[in-house]
Image (cartoon, coloured by chain):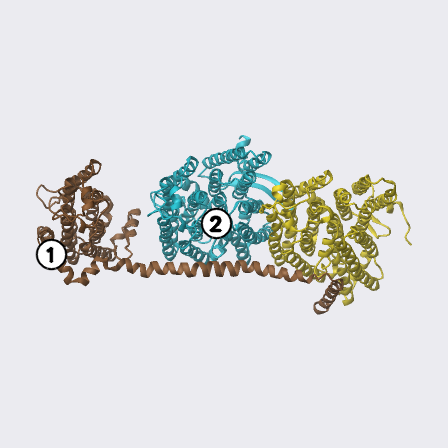
Chain colours: A brown, B yellow, C cyan
Amino acid sequence: MLPLPLPWWATACEKRRPKMPLSAAPTALAVVGLVGCLTAFFAATIALTQNDLKRMLAYSTISQLGYMFMGCGAGVFAAGIFHLMTHAFFKSLLFLAAGSVMHAMGGELDMRKMGGLRHKLKWTHLTFLIGTLAISGVPMLAGFFSKDEILAGDYEGPLGRPLLFWMGTLTAGLTAFYMFRGLCLTFYGKSRVEPEAEHHLHESSSKMTVPLMVLAFFSIVAGYVSWPKAWPFHGHEAFDHYLDPVFDPATKALSYVSAEHVGGLTPEALMGLSVLAGLIGIVLALWWYLKSTEIPDELAERYADVYRILTHKYYVDEFYNFIIVRPLRVISEKFLWPVVDAGAIDNVMVNGTGRSTSAMGDVLRRIQSGNIPSYATWVLLGAVLWVLYIFAFHT
Amino acid sequence: MITLQPLDMMRILPEIVLSVFAVLIMVLEPFVRAGHKKLLGYLALLGVIAAGGASARLTSLLYSWPGMGPAFGGSIAADEFSSFFIGLFMFVAGIVILGSMDYLERDHHQHGEFYALILMGTVGMCFMAASTDLIMIFLGLEISSIATYILAGYRRNDYLCNEASLKYFLLGSFATAFLLYGIAFVYGLTGTTNLLGASVRLAASPQWTPLAHVALILMFVGLAFKLSAAPFQIWAPDVYQGAPAPVTAFMSVGPKAAAFAVLLRVFLGSFTSAGDFSFWILWISAALTMCVGNLGALWQPNIKRLLAYSSIAHAGYVLVGVAAGGQRGISGVLYYLVAYALMNVGAFILIAYLAGADERLVKIDDYRGLASSRPAVAACLTVFFLSLAGFPTTAGFLGKFFIFRAAIHSHLIGLTILALLNSVVSVYYYFRIIVAMYMNDDKKETADAVLPWSVRTVLAICILGIFYLGLMPNDFMGLSTLAAMPLFK
Amino acid sequence: MSWYSTHILTIIIFLPLLGAVTLACLGRERASAIRWVALLFSLLTFLITVCLYSQLDPGRAGMQFQELRLWMFIPPVNYHLGVDGLSALMILLAGFLTPLSVLVSWKSITVRTKEFFIFLLALETGMMGVFASLDLILFFVFWEVMLIPMYFLIGIWGHERRVYAAIKFVLFTMAGSALMLTGIIYLYNITDTFDLPRIMAHLANFSSLSPIAERWLFLAFFIAFAIKVPVFPFHTWLPDAHVEAPTAGSVILAGVLLKMGTYGMLRFCLPLFPDASREFAPLICVLAIIGIIYGALVAMVQPDLKKLVAYSSVAHLGFCVLGIFVFRPEAIEGSIYQMFSHGVSTGALFMLVGMLYDRRHTRLISEFGGLATPLPVYSTFFLIVVLSSLGLPLLNGFVGEFLIIIGAFHSHAAYAAFASIGVVLAAVYLLWMYQRVFYGEVTNSRNLTLSDCDLREKLILTVMVIVIIAMGVYPQPFLRRMDQSVNSIMLRIERHTVILTDRAPAGHTGGGR
């Protein structure tokens, strides 16, 4: 997630008390939408350069979550939840397929050491392809419906903004690009697999491939639960209606908000634009990773700094480590524990009390000299002090 | 002119019985064969029981026959207060005699004089508690003190013991001189040594003269010595350590309780017109005594010395009750003294036997691993220490509770908190012994002899008493309250 | 009404003591018989506590199952017992943890087994007595009496610095209770009784306590409880006591004894001294939050596993104290629930650490690493307990913490914010510890040959995990029975500020549980 505390519990709270649509506050939603947008974009850029298959999918997940927040931010909550559902299908499919690849490769996940796996891992390849198509927003597959609904909402929804739409579309292009990059690097092209691993390569057992196929099926059909109204066959938008009781109050509250539409584009145009972005991404990926495979390396060299920042995930982890993790550890280890706890509290106050008490005891012990005259002197001294006391206080 | 009446003799019947038995023992001693000397002990016990019975009879005749009342022209008062203390002294004397019979046998000491001295000492203490005349008090004090001086040096071949006895004698006489001086001043001021008479005359003047204050202070010094109240406690550690353990048991409880009886009668029962003055004396003494006693005990390696300091500290707690005053304070004090007697005598008697012949093993280190080798003995000792520390379900806790209740009722909150904190400190040194016994696995040489039945009886009585007073205080509390009443007539 | 049902509390309190006496009669060589007898008595007591808890009437306000006998006449102290939802839950907790403690010490206590179990059972008597007492002196008696068995448990069967830790524990606690006794007696002076219900009735009349007196009395009680909980900065006895105690000792100490502090705050400080509670609340909340965060931070850098868990107790109980002093019904319910669930989770953690110590005789995290490989079953149990401790939803830790944070949020949003940081920090130190100990490669060759849990250990841990999950998924049976107690506490707290209308019991304002 972006280094911002996302007010996700705002949504959670909203669900706990449906009487008060907390999330109907425009400013809050604007923040949500903006954060979601930035998340989607930046995560996608990171995914562009990752070489670890699973890490790429991880950042892809973050990016898609950003999409869901964009949906909520624009006021089309149902779309966000819809994307959540479809994303569940194809992302889990992609991860499981990655696991299958990893199993076949004997634990290796670096895509630079893969390539041409589609020959040996037929089912894995097929299902991975379906998942990739779904996430890229290729029409008729699940991802397309949900992503499109979000982008449409970004544009013309109650709180939609053009900025959200254009960024979303750009990110859709990036998504298609890096997903196909992953696909190509892993399954197509020349095999860069190391000789020892080569022997290992085999398709996974049906225990692994059957779930993949099931998920692939749902990645295709899951979108149909919410066929858009504007389309032929008069879409029922069943999913959105299913969620109406939950979001109704919020939607009603939002209906009084006037959105700043630019207005210009029709829904069909919007759809077309997002599909176009996806296609551009796909084509670019196929070109750079299938045909002219030297281009990525050249670009990496030419824009070495940008490349490095992206590969290191904008140094966010390092930043956190520096600002939060290391200071906390150092403070706790060097200061809080030894100085405050063991030192000030325990040593000075607690044990100190014990030591001073016993020091007093020691002093008293030494008064007992064993010498009778000194004892007698004490008695006399005591008597004299008492008599003096009388004359000081009671006369 | 004071004429002797039969009633007077009746009213000191317990003391008479004890004296007769004491003399009898001394007379019979040469006639008893060696090896059967214990018979003398049984005789002494018989005497104690008889005297106790006499005292009880006196009390029970309260309503049907004038058993209670003044005697000897007002010098002696046989009232509930004195009966309570006489009962306590009888009890202490009884268990000390019972507990020391085998001790004397083991270490080959003279039996006859020992028992006789204990009995005579008890006589003195009884007189102290029952007296309402200053001279009589002094007499009782001297009788009990001299008996105790001799008892303290009973182990003639042990130089530590001799030193203790000498110290006790010299310093005791010194302190008693103060008492006598104070009594003289009182006589000079009021023309009488009778408590009632003197207090009436002192109360007659609107304000006490400085001389009257000095008189009171001097008397207090003398008493404070006996009580081991600070700063007059200085003799106690050496003497308690040097004296034979059963004698220490006797000394730490008997004369102290007797001195408290005198303190109560004189300061709270009689010279009440001193008011604020005596209150502050008591307050300061209580605070000092508690602190000195507890702090001094912290690092003692010798168990007898540690218990000596602990006795000083307990005297401090009792002084808190005296400072609190009133019905509640006095009944609390009385309850505490009974509890204290049980705890202390039991502990010292047990230590006497664990110390082995000639009392060699009296360091805390000598108790290491006692729990593994003699678990029952260790458990008994633990009970005594827990009671001394004031843990609930033991007599020590309820004693402190009653005293603190009285103290807070009299708004002595600071003193109470000080007392409670002192209790916490005391836990540390009592637990040092428990740590040695339980939490060490070395097996040190302890006196392997099985405890004789007499000692076991004493332990049983003390422990049962501690739990009885700790869990079912109603009877004794009733007795204490009853005993406190004469002071308010 | 049978004798059993009218005296159920007496039975619960004294049955373990009877067990201890029975054990005392057995010869010390018969170690096996000793263990089984101890287990039998503690299980029996547990069953009776379950009966008590289930028979507790959730709808009735006030104390139930009361027993009253005169004990002392002058001053009037009674043997007065009674429970409501709060105390019954604590009794259940004590009853639950004791047989498990017996089981966990089955093999590890080989020296002086008889005394060990005698002390353990005596400790149980003390614990039950504390929770059931309705008379202040009776409460104090049980409170102090409990110290002795615990002292012996730590001092005899503990680890290297056991004597130091034991005496520190006793002295620290006693110092606090010394103040409490002063307060109790002072309160008696004013109200003429030691009986809690009667004192509360007496104090319901506003003019009984002057503000100054109330403040001092509150402090007298509060400090005693704060030491027990422990609240920062009175906490330094805890790490020592926990680390040096034997496993069963740590379990009972963390599981039950610490809760007596928070129990005392709920039972005495808030109802008896509501105005003073309000006055001191900001300071106490700040201390609680410091405890939460400080405890977590120091726990993070501990090299010793047991000390880490000990400091985590400081952090968790900081939540409880915070929940109490924000004076919201949901927070108090959360606090009570957290008391129970912390007892279970941290008890389980100590048991797990103890099992590891039995095998390797070390508690240093650096000595372990990659334990998931040789000890898969153990690692799984450990993971569940760790997740419960850090408050993962669906496990018991979440319910309490969540309610507390909600309540805190309604009082001061800042409290909730800081407390939430504490939740994050809990995840930090727990997960980091788990990673260092269990994940990755086996770094120390001695760990390769370790044996996984045997049947007894699996039994103990399964029971704990079942309770953890059940409490996390279905907290309603427990929350329901707390409602009346929380209500009565809230009534006393709010007597100035709120004109009481028809209040729904606190259990329903949380929205669809």
**Disc 1 residue type (three-letter):** Glu
- Indicate the position of residue C470 as horizontal and vertical percent values: 38, 39
- Indicate the position of residue B481 as horizontal and vertical percent values: 71, 47
Q: Are marks 1 and 2 in contact (CB under 8 Å)?
A: no
Dividing the picture into quadrants, the one containing residue A321 is: bottom left
Query: In the displayed structure, does residue A248 sit left or right of residue A344?
Result: left
Q: Which mark is residue A294?
A: 1
Tell me the chain of label 2: C
Instruction: Tell me the quarter of the image containing the N terminus of chain B.
Output: bottom right
Secondary element under disc 2, as helix, strand or loop, is: helix
Dividing the picture into quadrants, the one containing residue C22 is: top right
- Indicate the position of residue C9 as horizontal and vertical percent values: 53, 37
Query: In the displayed structure, does residue A382 sit left or right of residue A102?
Result: right
The residue identified by callout 2 is C243
Q: Nearer the viewer, residue C463 or B107?
A: B107
Residue farthest along the front direction in this orientation: A195
Q: Is B168 situated above or below A381?
A: above
**Disc 2 residue type (three-letter):** Val
Q: Which of the two discs, 1 and 2, sits closer to the camera?
A: 1
Residue B484 can be seen, yes or no? no
